[in-house]
Image (cartoon, grey):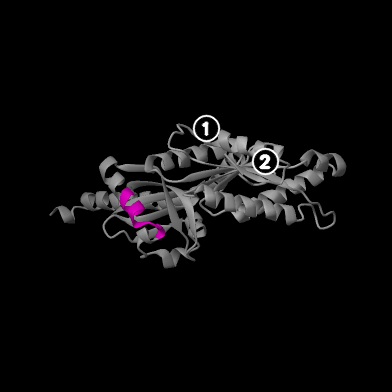
Amino acid sequence: MPGDDPYFKSEKERSTSAIKRSETNLRKILDASPFPIIVSSRGKGDVIYVNKLASNLFGINPTLARGRPEPAFFCQPADRETVADILEKVGEVDDFEARLKRGDGTEFPALVSASHVDYEGESAIFLSFNDITRRKEMETELIRLATTDPLTGLNNRRSFEELAEREFKRAKRYGNALSALMLDLDWFKRINDAHGHAAGDEVLKNVARIITEALRETDLAGRIGGEEFAALLPETSTADAMEVAQRLRATIESANVGSAEAPLKITASIGVSQRQDSDKELLTLLKRADAALYTAKDAGRNRVDKG
């Protein structure tokens, strides 16, 4: 009988020993990997191995993690399903972006890679993770720097015009009301000359805060020049926009726009205009509001005019 053949037994033992050595080497490689790794059963999707980095990343005990459903690490079940679909169709997944969750429920963004692997005699799924929280924070910061006025925190001119262009096209498409405000601080140069540029910066920051507080979340505001600001009010009639502008003018006039140690007063002139059906581009609306602003300036400042 083959089973009684010493040579057959020897070959079988050598084969079994080779498999065990291979599995031991695989575990050593996974343990030493620079990436967090989870291995789950291909059938049920239960976790059968977690390396130390994955344990740290997800905040879980490796022993307790075994037997846990591996999809539970994904915030969105659809993301895990997409990973599984790509894996079945292509044979591997390379840097799929998903949101994952730790043992305490906190979420984080990561790149997920996956492939099929034999692990301890079982067909399994090998998953590695790259936490990209820092990268996302840097991307957000770069976007903020590119779109935000660094002094006031409002949209810079370019960002304001891009966002306003979208609102203008939307209002034109659906025939909605849309109003624009152009605001300029009166005699601002006198503040800089008499109190210094640091005081002038404080004024600009405080006026930006007043503008932000006066507007709705759906409104847009931006600093488009040294002491010039703009706002766009979707679904707002001329009458309502005039009311907002008058309230804004009065608030600026009555506020201390300096510091607690060095209080300062300033006024603002504001031009208001509403989108007209004949307006073919945003610039036409803004120019009309700008012309109304200079009408207010010429009429004595600290006024609101419409164009």
Nearest the eye: 241 or 50: 241
Looking at the picture, how far across and down is residue 20, in whole percent?
35, 53
Looking at the picture, how far across and down is residue 53, in whole percent?
50, 55
Residue at 45%, 63% in the rendered image: 62
Element on which disc 1 rests: helix
Q: Taken as a whole, is the magenta stretch helix, strand or loop?
A: helix
Check disc 1 and report the residue beneath it.
284
Check disc 2 and report the residue beneath it.
296
Element on which disc 2 rests: helix
Q: Which quadrant of the structure image shows residue 227?
A: top right
Nearest the eye: 256 or 127: 256
Q: Nearer the viewer, mark 1 or mark 2?
A: 2
Q: Is residue 44 visible?
A: yes
The magenta span reads 73-82
Looking at the figure, which quarter contains the C terminus? top right
Dots 1 and 2: beta carbons under 8 Å?
no
Q: Residues within 10 Å of mark 1 (few under 14, many from 20)?
A: some
Q: Is residue 119 visible?
A: no
Residue at the front extreme of this rendering:
299
C-alpha span from label 1 to label 2: 19 Å
Residue type pointed to by label 2:
Ala
Residue type pointed to by label 1:
Thr
Q: Report the side of 85 relative to 303 (left or right).
A: left
Q: Which quadrant of the structure image shows residue 231?
A: top right
Looking at the picture, how far across and down is residue 85, in whole percent?
28, 47
Residue at 53%, 52% in the rendered image: 240
Q: Is 120 colored magenta in this rendering?
A: no
Q: Is 76 colored magenta in this rendering?
A: yes
Nearest the eye: 24 or 100: 100
Q: Report the side of 232 relative to 151 (left or right).
A: left
